[in-house]
Amino acid sequence: MTRWYYGWQMVLVSFVVMIFLTNPVTSQPQTNLLIRSCSTNNATDIQKFIGNLNETFRDVRTKLLNNNTYFTTSNQTRNSEPVYVLAQCRNYMSTGDCVSCFDFADRSIRFCAAANGARVVLDGCFLRYESSSFFNQTTLPGNVGLCGNRTSSRQTIFEMAVDGLLSNLTVAAPKINGFYAAVTSQAVGTNTSTAYAIAQCAETITTDGCKNCLQVAYANIKSCATDVTDGRGVDSGCFMRYSASAFFANNKTTDITPFLRDGSLHGVTELQGPKDYSFNDLKKATKGFQEDNKLGEGGFGDVYKGIVKDGNTVAVKRLALCSDIAKANFESEVRIISNVHHRNLIRLLGCCNKGPELLLVLEYMANGCLEKFLYGEKRGTLNWRQRCDIILGTARGLAYLHEQYHVTIIHRDIKPSNILLDNDFQPKIADFGLARLLPDGQTHISTRVAGTLGYTAPEYAIHGQLSEKVDTYSFGIVVLEIVSGRRCTEVPAEFQGEQCLLEHAWYLYESRMHLKLVDATLDPSDYKEEDVKKILEIALMCTQSPVSVRPTMSEVVMLLSDRSRVQNLPTRQNVSFNELSNADATITELTGR
Ligand SMILES: *[C@@H]1O[C@H](CO)[C@@H](O)[C@H](O)[C@H]1NC(C)=O
Ligand SMILES: *[C@@H]1O[C@H](CO)[C@@H](O)[C@H](O)[C@H]1NC(C)=O
Ligand SMILES: *[C@@H]1O[C@H](CO)[C@@H](O)[C@H](O)[C@H]1NC(C)=O
Ligand SMILES: *[C@@H]1O[C@H](CO)[C@@H](O)[C@H](O)[C@H]1NC(C)=O
Ligand SMILES: *[C@@H]1O[C@H](CO)[C@@H](O)[C@H](O)[C@H]1NC(C)=O
Ligand SMILES: *[C@@H]1O[C@H](CO)[C@@H](O)[C@H](O)[C@H]1NC(C)=O
Ligand SMILES: *[C@@H]1O[C@H](CO)[C@@H](O)[C@H](O)[C@H]1NC(C)=O
Ligand SMILES: *[C@@H]1O[C@H](CO)[C@@H](O)[C@H](O)[C@H]1NC(C)=O
Ligand SMILES: *[C@@H]1O[C@H](CO)[C@@H](O)[C@H](O)[C@H]1NC(C)=O
Ligand SMILES: *[C@@H]1O[C@H](CO)[C@@H](O)[C@H](O)[C@H]1NC(C)=O
């Protein structure tokens, strides 16, 4: 998804210009140029080529102007320089604005000179030509999400409304004649604001093609930070956009409710299932699950790096759970996980349930896991800003799993080895949803607690009481590790009386020595004392008992994003660290860890 534009056509593309302006307006040609790309192949007979190009463009313009249409194609194949052209305006435009946008696109695309393939994508319209027909193209590599500026206000409420809008559009637009829909949504909350969104496919593709294309566009938009106020998904066969500002008039919306009827909430049942891989393909991709390809060993099985048939690098997780129950739950659980799209959650690309084993095919993160950066081989390489981003991103990913996805997913095993880092050091949580493969009874201490020593909330470790707050607790512990660069089981030599990092953090907080917690590898000029204090307060709040005083993850996101101070300061409970250690000892016995 991050590759630019090769594959849109068989020819190589010489350059791509992406200009991104956030300037939504209604009733204008909307000529913000989003993408312009030209192929490297030039026409051999320039005279003939330009003649054909001009003729098809004239034809297209006439149709847009006179036929009250927003989509049209034309071709001229009379000589050695065939030209196929497709033009499309967003249906909320007036005819005049549509033609103005087309004229602007025509002028912009001439920049590609003799290149016999080119495209320009604008907010208001789309123009493309090639030397062969491309009208049936849907989603191709080069599809991209374009993310606008970020905001610090209103984001949580807004992003929830946007998510619902876009998933509804993904379901509805392919079923609507003309493959186009425009919708708005009133965000709920104290300060109401409206979100605007459209989805549109080329009219020459199929319903399934439109659906596939919009699903990719939707996923691309969702990989933008969740607080951007304006996002676009651009692909060969479709376009999707949302904004917090009105880019079409309120009377231009489409009633999509009739097209959502048979789907359940958010139309998730309509969404794609994961891709099926054969066991042999995955075996080949990982060179027979060779030790050299092993990326790590997780609670649910080993993970291998693999290169699949389409050339993409993936992570293949070979699940160690092979019980009948896991096999039986696999299909439905995997379908749920595969429809989770969030910037801070690892994407499930496919799976294999045919053959002897259960395997998951996941996004590959070249930077590996957070653990390595905190106290492994990359120790000391993350600066303060990066650590804060990792904390916020992880909180957002969890808030999504708990409160924004249509099924509540409790992770149960949040720890630095389950938080992966992308190329920009943004966190992506791995292994969510897998605990659901365990049979219900197996979550209690008497059999097995999903979770890892030191990160597990006491009520879960001791009594098997499971709630979202179990993840809040583990998150708090991970934050302490991120700030201190220490393992949760470790305290500095001079504090040997303390049993763990959490107890040490309480001590430093209560004696106002919070700066002592900060990783010594960090440059003291890199962080502010008040920021350290605030993050420590939030981390401690997350680890409080009883469960009811711990914040929800969306409250944590709000606290982290808000510049003001934390209002309800954390208070230490009489958490018995002894009791905890005893529980941990029991877990160790039972699970053999
Ligand atoms: C195509 O033409 C442009 C100028 O019109 C030129 O700069 C470019 O090198 C040409 N490319 C090829 C592959 O001939
Ligand atoms: C083709 O159209 C361009 C731009 O409209 C114009 O400058 C050029 O003269 C036209 N060429 C031919 C051969 O019609
Ligand atoms: C466009 O309109 C013209 C007349 O205004 C008509 O002759 C032509 O068939 C129409 N084309 C399409 C594609 O509908
Ligand atoms: C090319 O144009 C002709 C005549 O306008 C039309 O019949 C044909 O279907 C077009 N081809 C494609 C691939 O659209
Ligand atoms: C599109 O059409 C071309 C030729 O007309 C065909 O080879 C190709 O498979 C089609 N692609 C899709 C996605 O239908
Ligand atoms: C978005 O950010 C860019 C660069 O930081 C800035 O120039 C532009 O004014 C911003 N746009 C809006 C609408 O805030
Ligand atoms: C999406 O569609 C569902 C089902 O019709 C509806 O309940 C929900 O409010 C819609 N979401 C938004 C944000 O419009
Ligand atoms: C709501 O908007 C008002 C004025 O725009 C602002 O003062 C207030 O802080 C906002 N409240 C929230 C919860 O965003
Ligand atoms: C739709 O709204 C626009 C501006 O918001 C207005 O100019 C136009 O007359 C309205 N159209 C109809 C059919 O009500
Ligand atoms: C916690 O411990 C303190 C003294 O260590 C005691 O005074 C207090 O009552 C205890 N609180 C609870 C809730 O057990």
Image (spheres, helix red, strand yellow):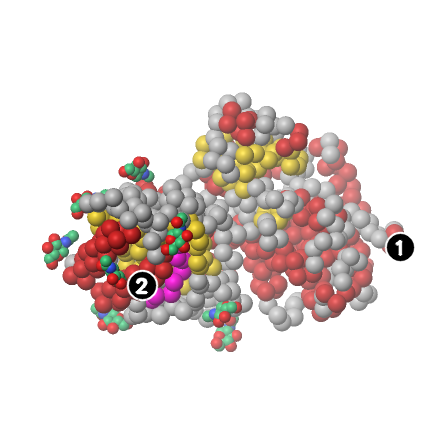
Magenta stretch: residue 32 in it? yes
Residue at image position (66%, 31%) is 292
**Helix, strand or loop under label 2:** helix
Question: Which residue was labeled with disc 1?
Answer: 494
Mark 2 to mark 1 CA distance (whole Å): 71 Å
Residue at image position (72%, 42%) is 453
Q: Mark 1: few, some, or many residues within 10 Å (few <14, many ≥20)?
A: few
Residue 491 location, x and y as percent? 82, 51
Q: Is residue 507 visible?
A: yes
Residue at image position (46%, 66%) is 189
Which tag, 2 or 1, sits closer to the chain's start? 2
Q: Quadrant of ligand 2?
A: bottom left
The tally of labels here is: 2
Question: Which residue was labeled with disc 2?
Answer: 107
**Helix, strand or loop under label 1:** helix
Q: Mark 2: few, some, or many residues within 10 Å (few <14, many ≥20)?
A: few
Q: Does residue 527 lie above or below 415 as drawn?
A: below
Quick one: 423 or 298, which is closer to the camera?
423
Q: Nearer the viewer, mark 2 or mark 1?
A: 2
Kind of residue at badge 1: Glu
Kind of residue at badge 2: Arg
Is residue 23 rendered to the left or right of residue 365? left
Is residue 531 rendered to the left or right of residue 256? right
Q: Quadrant of residue 466?
A: top right
Residue 312 location, x and y as percent? 51, 38
Is residue 100 rendered to the left or right of residue 583? left
Quick one: 137 or 161, which is closer to the camera?
137
Q: Check mark 2 vs ligand 2: CB closer than 8 Å? yes or no.
A: yes
Residue 519 location, x and y as percent? 77, 57
The span shown in magenta is 30-37
